[in-house]
Image: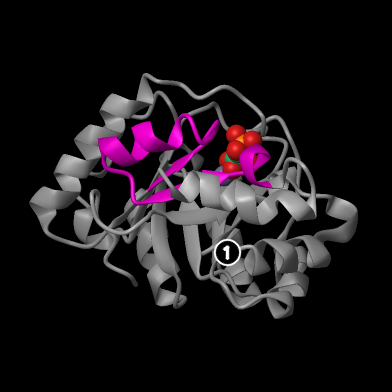
Amino acid sequence: MSQIRPGGPSPIIAPSILASDFSRLGEEIRAVEAAGADWLHIDVMDGHFVPNITLGPDIVKALRPHVSIPFDVHLMIAPADPYLEAFAAAGANWISVHPEAGPHLNRSLKRIRQLGAKAGVVFNPSTPPETIEWMMDEIDLILVMSINPGFGGQTFMHSQLKKIERLRAMIDACGRDIVLEVDGGVTPETAPLCVAAGATALVAGTAVFKGGPEAYAANIAALRRA
Ligand code: DX5
Ligand code: ZN
């Protein structure tokens, strides 16, 4: 895992396939990889934990041979535990769960690592930073939602910048190289705010996929300049 710190090298850019053309997923992910994406962010929704339905492990598995960049799988499903093994087997490198999706966050995180993936915790806009205070050692990635999860194309919630700062301080205090990622409404305008607050990875759907394949490289570069 790269040691990417605020003020250091540019953030990890993780395009969210939610904004891609679902009828051409293989082509789309090859195009963003060629355009400079560091990771691929895959949003899994169940129509129950969030009011939208997307895709499952079979699609993740089908996509895996198309690119070599890491798969950053964001599970917006409840319960998540019964599906962790399937997503790990499908090729997820990073698997993130919402604390609200099950009764035993610590158990879910341990299970993700046991399966050979990196473990992430996702913060809804209302989830307090203290949720992970006693499990910093079990976490490889923190994902701060700057929108309510469920849909792409929403407006960035500036209220979450303070939370990013707080989580940055918690990460620095624990001394571990935990990735601090932001998801929702990330654009060339909001990306610098996230990085200044301490983010080291940025998810972007709309801001990467707008304009079609010819625009992907410029769109990614514009976010990276943050
Ligand atoms: C929403 C997803 C996001 C979404 C972001 O629940 O978690 O990853 O794709 O889309 P944009 O970048 O358009 O806000
Ligand atoms: Zn996401």
Identify the residue shown where x is 76% and y is 49%: 20
**Closest to the observer: 108 or 28?**
28
* Secondary structure under the numbered disc 1 in the rendered image: loop
> Residue 164: horizontal and vertical position, in percent?
30, 35
Give the amino acid type for the residue marked by disc 1 in the picture: Gly
Q: Is residue 125 left or right of residue 42?
A: left
The quadrant holding residue 51 is top right
Q: Is residue 179 visible?
A: yes
In the image shown, does 79 or 16 lie closer to the viewer? 16
The residue at 18%/62% (across/down) is 176
User: For residue 192: magenta?
Assistant: yes
Q: Give the range drawn in magenta.
A: 181-208
| Vertical placement of residue 26 versus 68, above or below | above
Q: Name the residue under label 1.
A: 36
Look at the image and tell me in which quarter the C terminus lies.
top left
Q: Position of residue 29 (x, y in %)?
A: 72, 63
